[in-house]
Image: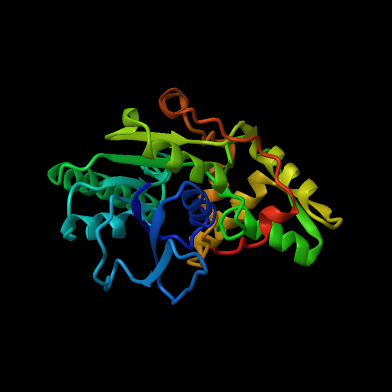
Amino acid sequence: MATLLVVGASGAVGRFLLPRLLADGHSLVATSRVPRASANPRLRWIVGNLDTSMPALPAFDGVLSLGPLDAFARWFAQARFEGRPRVIAFGSMSRESKRDSDDAAERALAARLGEAEDRLHAAAEAAGCAWTLFRPTLIYGAGIDRSLTPIARFAQRWRVFPQVRGASGLRQPVHADDLAGACVAALGAARTHNRIYALGGGERLAFDAMLGRMRASLPLRTVPLPVPVGAARALLDLAHALGLPSPHRMAVARMRRDLVADDAAAMADFGWAPRMFRPDAGSWIPRRID
């Protein structure tokens, strides 16, 4: 049992992680940008923003960063704390998948993630802290992600579901609760010290098959809307050439590419065994924050 600082606790992973840590007997200090309250005496919410201001913190034995890595790495590099707290942080598979993108903004994102990883490694090792970094694939399950949940909500609102023909690239969606379990497992596994792990879900399936599973999970009937991936890309490329905003242009371009994780090291080091992609209607409803 320990006192743990949880940064970004109101995010997708945090909504599953807080109950797990409390069940294990830990005392938690959780940060949020808005005031929150808890009936559990071992969970204390504090208002803090890594980019602007953080309040004085009590001593903590470990810190888990569940939000943007660049902000956490900057804060941790200049923070003052007692002892040598255990560090677990989340980065992103975008560090690898967008490094050679045709889009300058995506290449810049990959570069920022790489710089944040390097900054965190250097700061943790200078302080003598054991660190672990997770790079997850598509996160779902808490109903607040910006990748799969918006598609499900669009379908439920308009009663149509995009059926992207030719989207053969493999995906490996990972449930936020499984990532919460990875945090708990890594806390007690010395083999995870000073390591980076790619974390994907329990199966790899083609993008169009993933959408089919999502459609089947919805609580109402939807009409399939066939969208050839080539036509979708051509339209977004045209919008880009005309100077119109096309935020999903590169995402469409990647629908024929495999974006999966080699998570064999996580399986060996801390028993990573994520669930298959079998979403239900609750996967797209925001999970309550404890």
Q: Position of residue 246 (x, y in %)?
A: 53, 61
**Is residue 132 shown left or right of residue 8?**
left
Residue 32 in sight from this viewpoint: yes
| Residue 35 pos. (x, y %) | 44, 77
Kindly identify the residue that appears in the image at 27 percent across and 50 percent down: 116
Question: For residue 189, what is the image quadrant?
Answer: top left
Task: State the image coordinates of residue 158 (x, y, percent, origin top left).
Answer: 78, 65
Name the residue at the bottom extreme.
35
**37 on left or right of 90:** right
The residue nearer to you, when weighing 148 against 41, is 41
Say whether residue 263 is left or right of residue 221: left
**Residue found at x 55% / y 48%:** 176
- Looking at the image, which is closer to me, 74 or 1? 1
| The one of 25 and 139 positioned closer to us in this rendering | 25
Q: Name the residue: 47% across, 26% down.
A: 267
| Residue beneath the point at 34% across and 49% down | 2
Q: Quadrant of the C terminus?
A: bottom right
Return the x and y of residue 73 as percentages of the image width and height.
26, 54
Q: Is residue 181 above or below residue 239?
A: above
> Outermost residue, left direction?
126
Which residue is more in the foreground, 116 or 253?
116
Scheme by which the image is coloured: rainbow
Q: Using the rendered image of the protein, determine whether residue 226 is visible from the camera's viewpoint.
A: no
